[in-house]
Amino acid sequence: MIVNVAPSSSINSPATFPVNRRFRVTGLPNPFLLHRQKTKGSIYPSLLCRKIAATGRIVAAVDMKEAAIAEKKTRPVRIVGIVGEGSVSPLKSASWLDVMLHTAERLKWVDEEFEMIVFSDNFVKSKDETVNHVRNELDRSDILVVVAVRKEGSVNWIQSNSLNVPNIICFDTSLALRNKLGGVSVETEKRGDIFSSFLPFSQSKKLNESVEIARTVSDAWERHNSDDIRFCLLVIINAYITPVSTLKNLRAKGFSTLNCMVTNCGPQILNCLLDPNCRKALQCLNNCSPVDQVCNYRCIASYESQYLEEFSLCVLQKNNCLELDAKIPEKPYVTPMAEFRGEKLSPEIAEDLFVGWLGTLDWSWRVVAGQNPAYDQFPCQYQLFYRGKARGSFWYEPVFQVRTLEGDLVWRRRKYRVKRGKVPGTFHFSVLDNGVVSNEFWTIVDVSDDLSWGLFHYHGAARVAGQSYTGAVLVSPDGQYHMTQECYRV
């Protein structure tokens, strides 16, 4: 939908601020008069359903040899990436080399001890010391990531020089190169049950766990998002090398979880299992890795119901049966804009920037693009920021479309309470989403003087669901990408 965004005379005037600071929302036209269902990126850990699924199947998401991963390694985790020369990624046609270099930089946000070095495979035909340098890096690496390598010479070189690398994962690459996890060669598709019968039980179990991790990594990679590429590496690190803080909360806690659920939430469990949508949600979640936010979110968005909300409110929020405690990430640190139209940014002006076009239009902003793969990839999203009736109150309501797993487009809506942060341009958001409280820290990174675009960043966590996340949204009045003034800051 294209909206007439002709600015009012007040917006064109630099002497007055374009927004009615006292504007309050009492009613909204379509598509805002919607049944209030709370989903935008619902946080719901899939391992809950593993405890009550009729099959009783619990899928291992990590190698449970606690002796191997109980203590953090004293040396950094070393990752080597080898990328096909000149290969182009599906990420807005950026080269795979640039994508992987960006991934290497973002790994540092998770842990300063994660080191990744990336090479183009053109080093194979080099006659200088580069070949020896790559060989030396492989000799001390924990993970080798091979992307879009198809040249026979490069494939042969990697096969000959990666024998001692314990973890190898290959994407869009020659089939001659094999995946290896925890020292075991593994494919992303399971073989038949007859295969496992020829193996000793311990070896079969190890292989099955590696297959599940390979599937998780493969599924995430196929979404072709920069966050998911980083997620792939973190899953492998967490499973085979050292615990990753952002994933540690998603490990099963044992049978005490089931006891807590049955003791405290029996009626909610029964109601959920008897409700078709709630039951479908649990079945869908059972097919997700507990560390895959995107997969979990799609299940909740597709099959949400009142019974699912009551279930998660009891099991997670009220009783914390999973005993989880996620923290809001501190990195990357994003600095808020310092001034607007030459005036130092104050808390009041910062709120006005959030309010944006509301009053002139029926919404504050529309989202052009989102950075978080789980929470911002909606076909259509409206943002409404407004002051409430109570003194000092401020609210945020996103109204957005979700494409369900069954292909339907449905509207969703949530309501956040917003409070000012200590630094102007920063805010604390909180929301009850599908029975789980999420807290977020938002930053106004930049807004153009004519309000033709804005850039907002957020960190968030659903504490009792054990999940934390980061993201950013680029917004404009009509949801179209147009930069009429200076480019936004990153």
Image (cartoon, rainbow, N blue to C red):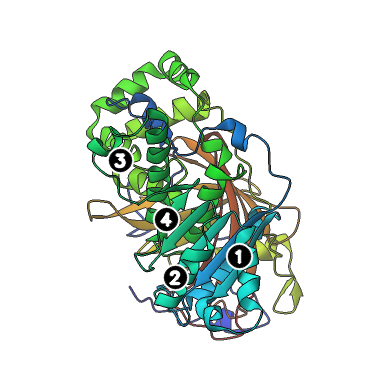
User: SS at mark 3?
Assistant: helix
In the rendered structure, find residue 179 and report the number of the disc placed on it.
Answer: 4
* Amino acid under disc 4: Asn
**Which residue corresponds to the image point at 60% horizontal and 82% vertical from the top-left?**
487
* Residue 200 in which image quadrant: top left
The location of residue 38, given as percent across then percent down, is 40, 44
- Marks 1 and 2 sit apart, C-alpha to C-alpha, by 25 Å
Which residue is labeled 3 in the image? 284
- Marks 3 and 1 sit apart, C-alpha to C-alpha, by 32 Å
The location of residue 346, given as percent across then percent down, is 74, 64
Of residues 26 and 305, the one nearer the viewer is: 305
Comes first in the chain, label 1 or label 2? 1
Residue 78 lies, with reference to residue 391, above or below; the image says: below
Of residues 32 and 391, the one nearer the viewer is: 32
User: SS at mark 4?
Assistant: loop
**Which residue corresponds to the image point at 53% horizontal and 78% vertical from the top-left?**
124
- Please state, as top left, top right, bottom left or bottom right, where the N terminus lies in the image: bottom left
Which residue is labeled 1 in the image? 104
User: SS at mark 1?
Assistant: helix
Comes first in the chain, label 2 or label 3? 2
Comes first in the chain, label 3 or label 1? 1
Q: Is residue 215 left or right of residue 363?
A: left
Q: Is any part of residue 435 visible from this angle? A: yes
Which residue is labeled 2 in the image? 156
Comes first in the chain, label 4 or label 2? 2
